[in-house]
Image (tube, rainbow, N blue to C red):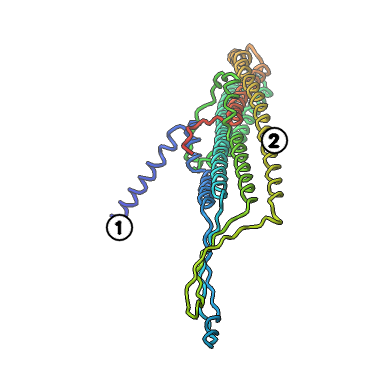
Amino acid sequence: MYLCLARTLSAVFGLVLLSLTPLANAQWTLERSIEQALSVAPELDAADARIEATRAAARQAGTWPNPTLELKADNAMARDRGGDSHEFSELAITQPLPLGLSSARRAAGDARVLVATEARRAERLNLEYRVATAYHRLQLAQALLAQSRQAAREAEGFADIAERRAAQGDISRRETLRLQLLSSEAKQLIESAEGEWQEARSAFASLLNLAPEQLGELPPLEDVPEPQGLTHWTDSLDSHPNLQTQREHLTAVLADKRIARAERLPQLGVRVFAERDRVDGRRETVTGVGLALEVPLWDRRQGRLGELAASSVETQARLSGEHRQLLSRVQVQHQHLTHLVVQARQQRSAVLEPAREILGLSSKGYLSGELDLLALVEALHTVRQAENRQLQLLADAWQELAALRASAGIFLAPTDSE
């Protein structure tokens, strides 16, 4: 029995490892990360629930009101016979007739379904943006950590060489201590970079509903492709979820105005009844039909119509303001992105590559005794600053591209049928 149990546990453990291995080994591209985040996002589950709620409300809005059943009992016929008992004397059914109301209420319900659907698309777009920003932040932290480790290895190598040269009397004790201090500073920078990397990894893993250890290593930061023209981004604004939400909200307000106008009309009700009465000394059943008509004496829905008219003006103003704001944001972000792409390219060719060449020459010169320590330290700092600047420019460009997609309403992952 224990052997079977051990085999079962071993099999389960093996399946768990197999299920986790692809997550750690397969690289998390941005598209794959977004798809994973979308599949586990509680925000989208809540949005789906809101859509189902509005659909149920729309179905309910189109139904007719229930009829009213009336039963009447009195002692009129019993008193004619000299008694005093109560008997059922009337049965009536009243059915309100919501003429014009059902279709208007159904249209308003359908409009609110579309509002909830567009709100879900807006939530989805915002989630894509959050995942992209966390993804690029982790890419930058990962690159800075690798860079700090490389810098520490280089500084430690120079410190070892300095100790050997100091033992031979080639350099002073001061230069040896300076290089050892440079190595110690580089090691401390690793701790700082590791802390930032762990924070970025935890934030990114939380969006994917994974443990940080399941992420593995992200692809390195690369150059952002040359951005497409401004019209590519502005042309997609009309379908932006935020604007579509405002448009559908305006449709819902107009549908509510139809309801209010229909409610201004006198409401009708049909009453069908059967009554027991004495006719020529005999008990007979009398049937009839009645019509109930509302008299709109006090409530003409003027306040409701005024409220909805103001609400429609407000929604139109919000729509116009949202469109203007998004258009301005797209223009500014596109300009900034273009500038960052050019700046990163120039930084690499005009600063980073020459700085690395200078460091190589300075290292050879210092090892051969042609250059002093100050020239080497200065070359090291120049390269580190150039590398940091290059990585920051790349990360800023990718972040700006993510912001531009969010402002233009462009989805990166394939959209499902919503």
Task: Categorize mark 1 by other alpha carbons within 10 Å: few (<14), some (14-19), many (20+).
Answer: few
Residue beneath the point at 66% across and 57% down: 295
Q: Secondary structure at mark 1?
A: helix
Q: Which numbered disc, 1 or 2, marks the residue that appears first in the sequence?
A: 1
Q: 328 or 87: nearer the eye?
A: 87
Residue 181 x, y percent position in the rendering: 65, 28
Describe residue 412's horizontal placement relative to residue 331 as left or right. left
Q: Is residue 244 above or below residue 236?
A: below
Q: Is residue 328 visible?
A: yes
Q: Mark 1 sits on what residue?
A: 2
Residue beneath the point at 51% across and 80% down: 87
Q: Mark 2 sits on what residue?
A: 317
Q: Quadrant of the N terminus?
A: bottom left
Tag in front: 1 or 2 = 2
What is the three-letter code of the residue carrying label 1? Tyr
Q: 78 or 180: nearer the eye?
A: 78
